[in-house]
Image (cartoon, rainbow, N blue to C red):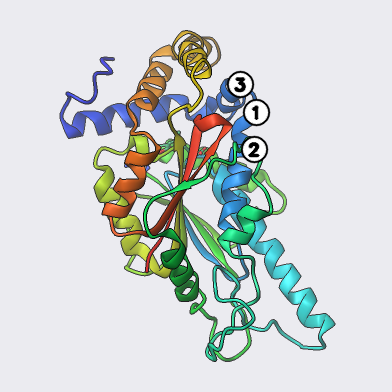
Amino acid sequence: IDFGFRQVPREAKEGLVGQVFSSVASSYDIMNDLMSGGLHRLWKDRLVESLRPFPGQEHLDVAGGTGDVAFRVLRAVRAAEVEERMAAAKAGRTSGTGRRAGWGPGPSSSSSASPATPSPSPEAASAAGPGPGSDASSSSSSGVGAAAAAGRSAAGSGSSGSSGLLSPGRVVVCDINPDMLRVGQQKAAAAHDLAGDSGLSFVEGNAEALPFPDASFDSYTIAFGIRNVTDRPAALREALRVLKPGGRFLCMEFSRVTQPGLREAYELYSFAVIPRLGGLVAQDSSSYQYLVESIKQFPDQETFARMVEDAGFRGVTYENLTAGVVAIHSGFKL
Ligand code: SAM
């Protein structure tokens, strides 16, 4: 396969990406562990920690593949709901408060429709310390503070209504590749805590033209997916469209290593080791050659932050993990 995909027509790139992920689907999880030495698990944990899942959250994980991120989000949402029910029981209430924590305003909020549960602000979350592998070099583009605060307020307006009954959250895994989705569905069916959960669904769809109505979700994640998308500005605009006002966008992607020395070592490892590993374990070195080339061609942290802003997100920030091997970009729909 010729991986000079930047020169090939759009349909050809989509076809190549499709072939790559169909080919690697069955060995995708084990290859992730091998290639990253298990680090991808810590990066994904950090992504979900940054999301700060809350009771009743409606979440979309695009390019969700075999479900790694979606499963983590759903487990965290369910844990938040259990906590909410226990707090309600302790307070002598028969049901939940109907409150949605999210990124909503704190206890001093005067919002009467849906008072938000006190929840740590993004600033407080950062102050609590960086996650695993984080080099704590979070950076941001312009106008972050005010916009993020406005985003939190808007997100707090989501509510399950005045009845006090909190509807359970849901997580949708959306991916263009049915083979990756199939592996994800098998994993969910085998997981005792996910198997019977009707809040988890798998939908085949393209990030560039999502099969969901406007303002459907509280939050959107895309992990190691956007670099595979042909028209990235279109995918970012779609993310904005399907989010509710105040909704949160998080994108985790390989990025630029910030430390000289480490950068060269990482490149050597990527180009010399990963395709060979792919050949040995997945019997497919070409697909892994594509993966490392697509990482090298992906825009750096600042450039991608501008793309997220250009799509219409506000309060855009990013956090480097493992010296910038990976970055998490965050933005709000205001
Ligand atoms: N998010 C998962 C994870 O972190 O393990 C899977 C990441 S995998 C490297 C990239 C995924 O992006 C593949 O499952 C692929 O099918 C999907 N993908 C590629 N292009 C896409 C598109 N245009 N729309 C939706 N998904 C896409």
As drawn, 288 above or below 44: above
The secondary element bearing badge 1 is classed as loop
Q: Is residue 190 left or right of residue 28?
A: right
Distance between mark 3 and mark 1 Cα atoms: 7 Å
Q: Position of residue 250 (x, y in %)?
A: 46, 51
Q: Please name the residue shown 59% across and 84% down the image.
A: 115
Q: Amino acid at mark 3?
A: Leu
Marks 3 and 1 close (CB-CB < 8 Å): no
Residue tagged by mark 2? 42
Q: Amino acid at mark 2?
A: Leu
Q: Locate the N terminus by quadrant.
A: top left
Marks 2 and 1 close (CB-CB < 8 Å): yes
Quadrant of residue 178 in the image?
top left
Q: Is residue 314 left or right of residue 6?
A: right
Q: Position of residue 94 (x, y in %)?
A: 76, 87
Q: Please name the residue shown 51% across and 15% down the image.
A: 261
Q: Please name the residue shown 47% across and 8% down the image.
A: 272
Q: Which label's residue is closer to the chain start, 3 or 2?
A: 3
Neighbour tally class for label 2: few under 14, some 14-19, many 20 plus, Cα within 10 Å: some
Quadrant of residue 151 in the image?
bottom left
Distance between mark 3 and mark 2 Cα atoms: 14 Å
- Is residue 59 in view from this perspective? yes
Numbered circle sitting on residue 38: 1
Numbered circle sitting on residue 34: 3
